[in-house]
Amino acid sequence: MAGLLSFSLQRRLLAWLLLPLLVALPLLGMGLYQQVQRDAQGWLDEGLEDTALTLAGQIDLRGGAPRIDISATMDRALRFDRQDDVFYLVQSPDGEAMQGDAGLADLQPRPAQQPAGHSWYGDVKLRGRDLRLVQLGHDCGAGSCQILVAETLHKRDALQSQIGSLVALNGLGLAVLLALAGWWAIRQGLAPLTELSAELEHRDLHRLNPLAARLPRELVPLQSAFNRLFERLDRAAGAQREFLADAAHQLRTPLTSLQTEIELALLEPHDQRLDPVLQRLRHRVVRSARLAQQLLSLARAEDRSVNVGQRIDLRDIAAESGQDWAHRDLPAGVDLGFELADAPTLGHAFLLREALENLIHNAVSYAGSGARITVRTGRDADGTWLEVEDNGPGIPVAERAAALQRFRRGSSATGAGSGLGLAIAADIAARHGGQLELLDAQAGPGLRARLSLPALPGSVPAA
């Protein structure tokens, strides 16, 4: 009893409520539980078989060879489920995929062929995912077509849990009902605090808007304290961004003027012995101007007022960048090429153009003379992407995470970079809900910087 008194109120209440439950659990009727579970699983299996029968009804045997044509609307209807992912596959008698998800052919264990009019139910695995499968044989003239319909187990697991709860309620009676009611009351009472913790877990300097959840009166002072903290952090972050932008802007103008004066001095008659000094001075001014531009890019990437929800295409951004680089002087032997495909997404064109500019500039600077650099855009099932690949020395795998940090460079890096290019691209990718990855080149030595973004809602990946 002394131990109980040292617990929190929640633990003390739960302990007194769970003690009768633990004593009464062996008295539960397992037979009733198993029977209800079997009936419920059979009902769900019948739903899968109904889908298989619907697909069987769509098989056209006219013309000799079986064929099936499922419209997009019917495909969505067949796959609709609020809780689970539904897959289907229609195979010809010789095992060829006629319609649906061809990946179902890789099920483990692979069920045997079913004669026409027969069906088989079972639990299978597909690439590590547990599925419930029905395989139906359908007469296709020359043989039996196989119709496979599978779904994930979320609904079944949830139903199994619900059945167990219902059987337990019937077995324990009023004592269990009171225990569950108390547990539910405690859980519901603490739910706002759990939700508040989850919301705080996802906050960062890019998301400092005030908490607006409706909370019990006891938690309102805590929410107000967090909102005041967010306000102070927002002011501090805003001041930092403004200082960075102002400093970079104030530096860029005189640096541009100084670069122009140096170039004019090189054109004017002068002592040729000063050429090396003027060239070094010009090189350092260009590098400082580039650093000022990168600082401005950092400030823009962290500006939460920038709308990154505009409909854009990474292909257009890369094409514009290509036109710009076509008029620049590249190091001797550097080959800059573009392989562009449609890549629609939501974002901010200027920021993504700046990210690509930094990736290309990084490749040109570090890949070395005679390097081959390729810019690509495209999309896949995971979203849209753009990447810059070179055949230079690359970055060791152990150093790639550090290379994405500000003012960090690889141990084998040459040139006069500041270590900001990859960091800026990574920040811009994160600002858009994506990520920047440093990968090996597709063939041979080199580095492939891949910027991945979420797919445009409603878009269909290219084949």
Image: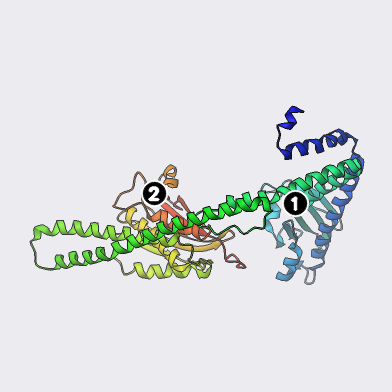
Residue 259, relative to residue 134: is it above or below?
A: below
Q: Under tag 1, what secondary structure? A: helix
Q: Relative to the observer, which residue lies in front, 452 or 439?
A: 452
Name the quadrant of the N terminus: top right
**310 left or right of 362?**
right
Q: Relative to the observer, which residue lies in front, 185 or 63?
A: 185
Where residue 332 sits: x, y (%)?
27, 59
Type of amino acid at the residue the image marks with label 2 = Gly
Where residue 287 sits: x, y (%)?
28, 57
Type of amino acid at the residue the image marks with label 1 = His
Of callouts 1 and 2, which one flags the residue occurring earlier in the amino acid sequence?
A: 1
Q: Residue at x 56, y 52 (%)?
A: 226
The residue identified by callout 2 is: 394
**Circle 1 crowding by C-alpha within 10 Å: few under 14, some 14–19, many from 20:** some
Residue 71 numbered mark, or none: none
Where residue 18 sits: x, y (%)?
81, 37
Where residue 50 sits: x, y (%)?
84, 61
Real-space CA distance between mark 1 and mark 2, rounded to the nearest whole angstrom: 44 Å
**408 left or right of 10?**
left
Q: Residue at x 79, y 72 (%)?
A: 62
Question: Which one is closest to the eye, mark 1 or mark 2?
Answer: 1
Q: Does the residue at mark 1 contact the one at mark 2 (Cβ under 8 Å)?
A: no
Q: Quadrant of residue 77?
A: bottom right
**Circle 2 crowding by C-alpha within 10 Å: few under 14, some 14–19, many from 20:** many
Q: Under tag 2, what secondary structure? A: loop
Q: Relative to the observer, which residue lies in front, 233 or 416?
A: 233
**146 left or right of 326?**
right
The number of callouts visible is: 2
Residue 154 numbered mark, or none: 1
Name the quadrant of the C terminus: bottom right
Q: From this viewpoint, is residue 360 visible?
A: no
